[in-house]
Amino acid sequence: MKLAERHCEPCTAGGKPLSQAESLELIRQTSGWVLKENQIEREFKFKNFRQAMDFVNEVADIAEEQGHHPDIYIYYNRVRMTLSTHKIGGLSHNDFILAAKIDEQVGAPQPATL
């Protein structure tokens, strides 16, 4: 089953984060996301601030539906998102599921250079 077809599931505090090998396998199933230590991130570039904000609002809807939320940084026409499961201090399947949903469901633009 593709990541974007899965649903985020609640994590419990003290759970174990994914291994480096598991994270490397899952990052290959996303588009433009970069693995950085205990998180994944991606930057998106838009024509203007309004488009960037529309994108952020669409992502917020997906995140609420999934019960898993990215850290979002907005810089005029750029949006940088990072995903990590704070409860377990690292990456979980939920991070990659949400990344794939953002890519597929929102029709995310090509990644900007980080």
Image (cartoon, rainbow, N blue to C red):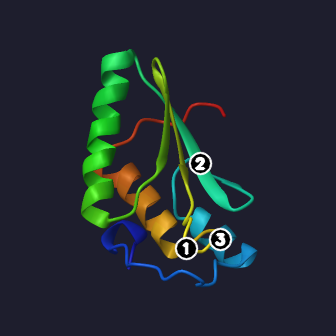
Of callouts 3 and 2, the N-terminal one: 3
At 63% across and 84% down in the image, what residue appears? 16
Q: How many residues crowd mark 3 within 10 Å: few (<14), some (14–19), many (20+)? A: many
Give the alpha-carbon distance from disc 3 to disc 1, as whole Å. Answer: 8 Å
**Residue 35, position in %: x, y?**
68, 56
**Amino acid type of the residue that numbered disc 2 sits on in the rendered structure:** Glu
Comparing marks 3 and 1, which lies closer to the viewer?
1
Q: Nearer the viewer, residue 45 or 79?
A: 79
**Residue 43, position in %: x, y?**
55, 36
Query: In the image, is 3 to the left or to the right of 106?
Result: right
**Vertical order, 52 against 58 (above or below):** above
**Amino acid type of the residue that numbered disc 1 sits on in the rendered structure:** Ser
Element type at marker 2? strand
Q: Which residue is mark 1?
A: 92
**Residue 33, position in %: x, y?**
58, 50
Q: How many residues crowd mark 2 within 10 Å: few (<14), some (14–19), many (20+)? A: many
